[in-house]
Image (tube, rainbow, N blue to C red):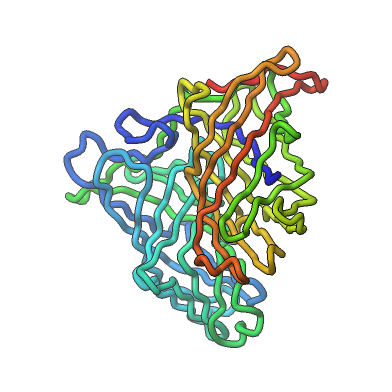
Amino acid sequence: MLTMTLALAFSAAAPSLPSAEIGGYFEFEEPWSQHTIIAASGGGGHSLHFVAPELSGEVGCGSTLEGTAESNTTEDIRLSAAFTNCTVTSTGAKAPIDSNGCWFTFKMAKAPVDVAEQTVQLTCPVGQKLRITRSDCTIALPPQTFTGVTYGQATNWGKPALTVSFDSKLVFEYEGGICAFLGTSQTGTLKGSQTLKGWRTDGEPAKVDVEWDDSLGHFVSAVEHPTITGTENAEHHLDFIAESIGGEIGCKKSTYSLTGSSETAQVTAVAPTVSECSTTATGAAVGVGFNGCSYRFDAVAGTTSETEQKIDLVCPTATGVQILDLQSCAIEIPAQSDIGKITYTTVEEGGDHAITLDVNAEFTIHAVNGPCTMLGTTQTGTLKGSVLVKAFDTAGEQVDLTAT
């Protein structure tokens, strides 16, 4: 059965936000009298570097990311990008970057701000890509979503500001030059940091901050540092379904557990391990690789067995989960947010409380090649079934686990 990982999280939102499932949000100047102009820039030890595999030297730039906040709270920030004075750090050779109208959307994950699982989305006009031109290679960055982003506290003339730090894996496409012989699809890295500052339209500094309300929905275990284990068996199991594969995919062996969480746990993501996967229609073997991806769960305040939850699929690279050797096809599941529908039911198991996760989630999949592309490269997949989740103390004894 294709496995989902339990990751424990708070989920809350500011009263002014439209969704009770966000948990974190950006906050700007209040009372709201003028739009806040947001500018992220380098200087003071802050810069951005693009690291391309097998190419000598990093491409480092001065950069400016700019946008405007239209209210005093928001779930994400859209910033246009301009890169200046870009050079290969090892040689000083110029390597200009053309944003081609692309922009970055900074999002708040369902986690405290010190968790390095914040998400940034690179979006471009139709047919465009962000492009780096080195003397030995032309590199394109297509639209994609990446993690490995953290927000730290800073100041701007006495007003709160943010340091945005990157250690993120990105998809690079080698388009021209000698590097094309290395293969067109590569995984590169974005490193460095920017200072995110706010300015009022009259030129005065303005507040740019992040807020997190951890007083609402949460999972609770009976002990500190429990081990959380999800179990699939004849009664509880998960199957992946996509119309183009002509059947369901299940895995006989699956391992996923969570350790080190607190009694009232915050976000932790765990990558599952699966083996002996096959299609239920024909029994044909299927390779399933999570590539470091994991599922992150939260709990809406006042959770009952009727409350529909949503989960996030977070991945260290844009490749995401891969399903291979399926009727000579390959399918990829990219990182994505707010996959639903999930419900949690508290049950009694061996005299202690446990949680049954019932899953009927739809999400985007990409058919890469073979017959499964006949229905289009972008399709909808479904994950159905259930998982029984238990908590154990350090002695291996089961303890209560509930979602509220």
For the question of whether residue 221 can be seen, the reply is: no
Q: Is residue 210 left or right of residue 250?
A: left
- Image coords of residue 59 (percent x, y): 53, 72
Look at the picture and state if 342 lies above or below 395: below
Toward the viewer: 236 or 118?
A: 236
- Image coords of residue 295 (percent x, y): 60, 43
For the question of whether residue 400 can be seen, the reply is: yes
Toward the viewer: 341 or 28?
A: 341
Toward the viewer: 320 or 104?
A: 320
Name the residue: 44% across, 74% down. Answer: 97
Name the residue: 74% across, 47% down. Answer: 251
Look at the picture and state if 8 lies above or below 246: above
Name the residue: 63% across, 50% down. Answer: 293
Q: Is residue 86 left or right of residue 334?
A: left
Identity of the residue furthest to the right in this view = 395
Look at the picture and state if 172 lies above or below 287: below
- Image coords of residue 53 (percent x, y): 64, 71
Q: Is residue 375 left or right of residue 78?
A: right
* Quarter assignment of residue 327: bottom right
Identity of the residue furthest to the top in this view = 351
- What is the number of callouts on the image? 0
- Image coords of residue 208 (percent x, y): 34, 43
Name the residue: 55% across, 74% down. Answer: 173
Quadrant (top left/top right/bottom left/bottom right) for the N terminus:
top right
Toward the viewer: 41 or 184?
A: 184
